[in-house]
Image (cartoon, rainbow, N blue to C red):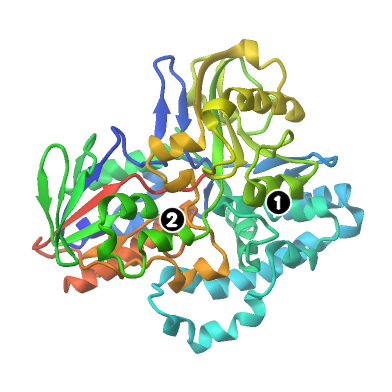
Amino acid sequence: MLLARAGLHVRVLERLDVPGGRTSTITTPEGFRFDLGPTFFLYPRVLDEIFADCGYDLRREVEMVRLDPQYRLVFGAGGELLATPNIERMEAEVARLAPADRGAFTRFMTSNRDKFERFAPFLEQPFESWLDLATPDLLKLMPILKPWKSLDSELGSFFSDERIRLAFTFQSKYLGMSPFRCPSLFSILSFLEYEHGVFHPTGGCGAVSTAMARIATDMGVEIRYNEPVESLEFEGRKVMAVQTPQARYAADATVVNADFARTMTRLVPDRLRRRWSDRKIASKRFSCSTFMLYLGIEGRYDDIPHHTIYLSKKYRENLADIETRHRLGSDPSMYVQNAGITDSTLAPSGMSTLYLLIPVTHRHPNIDWRREAAGYREVALDQLDRIGIHGIRERIRYEKMITPDDWQDDYEIYRGATFNLSHDLKQMLHLRPHNRFEDLEGVYLVGGGTHPGSGLPVIYSSARITSDLLLEDLGIDAGKCDQVPTSHATIHGTEPASAL
C-alpha cells in the first residue's frame, strides 16, 4: 500500500491462496473460520496511520470490537483475574486476588505511559549500526528502559504477588520469550493492552489482511496467489529477478516478508551472505514454537470469555521445558480463543470455534512430533477442563492440528519458531537483520525477523520503516503520492508473523 501510494509498480508473490501469510484465515467446508496465527489485535494506531496515508479509514474498512474484559487469566497456582481496561475495575480485580498490591496497577500504568511515549519514536525508525544507539535522546532513556533488568524483575517493583506479575508479563509470549529473560522494556506490551485496547476485527485478524489486499489491488498492486518463489537471480550481490513456477520477474527492488532465516538458508547462496551466513543464523537464539488445535464445535460456550489464558501451576518449570530442556510437560500453559461470543460470522448457527495454542519448544531433536502429536493432542484437550470447557471431544465437528514440524514444513518457518528470532538485548535494534538488508543489494526486509520485531503493531511499523528506506534508495519522496510510476518492486513471502 505504501509503495503503491508513492508511485511504484508493485507485484506481490504469495505462496498461499489467500493474503496475509500467518495473519490469514482458515476457512472450512463446514462453515468454520479461524485465524491461522494472530488473534489479539493491539495498538491499531500504526495501521490507522498507514491507511490514512493511503487515503483510507481503517475503521471503515474493517469493523472492530474493543473487548471488555480483554481476557480472563486462570492461574494454575489458584485464582482467576478478568483483565479489563477500566482502571477502577482492574484495581478491584488486582486487590481481590492480591490485597497487598492494591493501587499498584495505577502506578504501573503511569510509569509505562511515560516509558512508551518516550521510547515509541525509536520503534518507528531504522537501526542500521551501533551509532544509531549513541544518540543523546536514547542514552537519556537508559535509566527508564533499564536494559539490565528482566521483565519479571521490573514488574516486581510494582506487584508483590507472583500471579499478578504473571498477569502483566505473560505478554512476553507475544515475542516467544520467558518473562524471566525478556528485557524489562517490554512491560510496554501489557501497558498498550490496557491503554489502547484489545480488539477483535469482525471475521478475525485475517480480515485485516483481506482488506489490505483489496485496497492494495485497488491501488494498482498486482497480487499473484499460489505462486511461491523458487529461486533468486543474482548479479554479484544484487537481486535482479525472482523465479516462480509460472514466470521470471525482474524488479528494481525486492522486499522479503517471508520468514527471514528460512528464506536466507533456502534461496540465498551462503557465499553471498557475509554477516548472516548459515552458520551465523544457526547460532542465533530463536523463539518458541506453538502446538495448535483449531476446533469446530457443536454448541456454544457462552460463559467462556473471548480470550482465556491458563498459566501453569509450575510456570517456571513450564518455561524451562520450552526454552532449555526442550521437552513436553504434563501441565502446559495455554491460550484459548472462544471468538463466537463476540463474532457470529465465524461458525454456523448454534456452533462455535475454539482456537487452542500451547507454547512449546521450537523444533529440537528431543521431540519427534510424528510420535508425540497424537498424545499431546490428548494433553491439550484435557487442559481445557482447567478453564471450564468440559466434554469437548464428543462435540468436535472439525479439527486441524499444527505442530512445530508443520510450521517449518508447511508454512516455511525456520525451526518452526513462530515468533522468529528471540528479542533479547543481543538480537534487538541494529543487532537484528536490517530493514535495508545489509548482505544483499536491492533487498529489503519486513516482518518479525527484522527491526522492530514480532507482534502485529511493530510488524506494521516495520512496513513503514522499510518502505521509507526503499523509496529513499530509489530517489522517491515518500511524502508525495502523485508521482509517475518509474520503478518496480517485488514482495514475496508469508509474513506478517506473530501469534499468540
**Quadrant the C terminus occupies:** top right
- Which residue sits furthest bottom? 136
* Rendered location of residue 243, percent (x, y): 15, 46
> What amino acid type is highlighted by mark number 2?
Gly
Provide the secondary structure element on which disc 2 rests: loop
Where residue 74 sits in the image (x, y, percent)?
76, 39
Q: Secondary structure at mark 1?
A: loop
Residue bearing mark 1? 86
Q: Is residue 429 above or below residue 192?
A: below
Q: Which mark is residue 448?
A: 2
Mark 2 or 1: in front is 2
The one nearer the camera, 154 or 182, is 182
In terms of image quadrants, where is residue 103?
bottom right
Residue 135 is situated, as x and y percent measured from the top left of the image, at: 48, 87
Disc 2: CA contacts within 10 A as few (<14), some (14-19) or many (>=20): many
Question: Is residue 274 placed above or below 240 in the rendered structure?
Answer: below
Identity of the amino acid at label 1? Answer: Asn
Residue 286 appears in the rendering: yes
Report the residue at 34% width, 66% height from top. 435
Question: Which quarter of the picture shows residue 7?
Answer: bottom left
Q: Quadrant of residue 312?
A: top right
> Residue pushed farthest right?
100
Determine the residue positioned at 63% across, 28% down: 376
The residues tagged by marks 2 and 1 sit, at their Cα atoms, a distance apart of: 31 Å
User: Do the CB atoms of the residues marked 2 and 1 lie less than 8 Å apart?
Assistant: no
Q: Is residue 4 left or right of residue 257?
A: left
Q: Residue at x 29, y 68 (%)?
A: 439
Q: Nearer the viewer, residue 216 or 271?
A: 271
For label 1, the crowd category at 10 Å Cα-Cα, with few meaning under 14, some 14 to 19 and many 20 or more, is few
Q: Is residue 101 left or right of residue 482?
A: right
